[in-house]
Amino acid sequence: MEQNEVNQIVVQCQEGSKESFRRLVREYQSMVFSLTLKMLCDENDAEDACQDTFVSVWLNLHKYNSEKGKFSTWIYSIASNICLDKLKRRKPQLPMLSDERAFKAYATNPSPERQLMNSEWVSIVRVLAAQLSPKQQLVFTLRVLENVPIEEIESITNMNATKIKSNLYVARQQIKQQLIRLGYEQE
């Protein structure tokens, strides 16, 4: 959907059109759910965060200003903040021993099929990313897993590019160290 069309739909929503809001939800639901699932690593929590995001969008549509940025950036920002709040309320979780065994078995398997199991690899990285600080996890998820440009991450997180790159560097280093500890060797 083009930005102009999105802006028109947002104006209709601001005027109270529930049908227009349904269109926005249909348009952005998969994007928001993808982010919340990658951030929270739990489908139920991700669904809750996705729902909370759209409730917040509905309640705060009057605050959205298309001149300040894209709607997708604004909704990413809301979803990110909801995920950060949920992560801060969680107790830190260490990977279970069975997870570590599975990671080790995967990391030390030299077969060519390992190269083809990208979705499993992404799942492993997501679990490891869940152990990062909330800010590092947010930046890592947005940049690495969602492929969001640094400039847009600045708008979403209200962090400057240097802080984003610093958090991203630390996140990558921590994940790399965990992978090494689990037996993964760089080729």
Image (cartoon, rainbow, N blue to C red):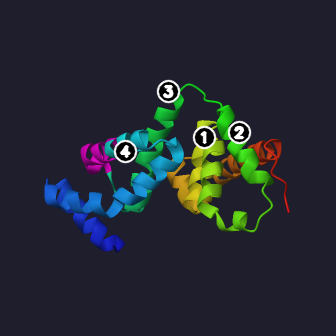
Residue 43 vertical position relative to residue 154 in the rendered view, above or below: above
Q: Residue at left 23%, top 65%?
A: 9
Tell how many labels.
4
Q: Amino acid at mark 4?
A: Glu
Name the residue beneath numbered marker 1.
130
Read off the magenta span. Answer: 52-63
Q: Is residue 139 left or right of residue 34?
A: right
Name the residue beneath numbered marker 2.
100
First in sequence: mark 4 vs mark 2: 4
Please tell me whether residue 61 belongs to the stretch shown in magenta.
yes
For the C terminus, which image quadrant? bottom right
First in sequence: mark 4 vs mark 1: 4
Q: CA distance from mark 3 to mark 4?
A: 17 Å
Q: Secondary structure at mark 2?
A: helix
Res. 68 in view: no
Q: Is residue 133 left or right of residue 25?
A: right
Q: CA distance from mark 3 to mark 2?
A: 24 Å
Name the residue beneath numbered marker 4.
47
Q: Secondary structure at mark 3?
A: helix
Q: CA distance from mark 2 to mark 1?
A: 14 Å
Residue 161 position, x and y percent, is: 65, 54
Q: Is residue 69 left or right of residue 54?
A: right
Instruction: Decide: few, some or many residues near mark 4? Use Cα within 10 Å; few <14, some 14-19, many ≥20.
Output: some
Relative depth, front residue between 185 and 97: 97
Instruction: Decide: few, some or many residues near mark 1? Use Cα within 10 Å; few <14, some 14-19, many ≥20.
Output: many
Q: Which mark is residue 89?
A: 3
Instruction: Decide: few, some or many residues near mark 3? Use Cα within 10 Å; few <14, some 14-19, many ≥20.
Output: few
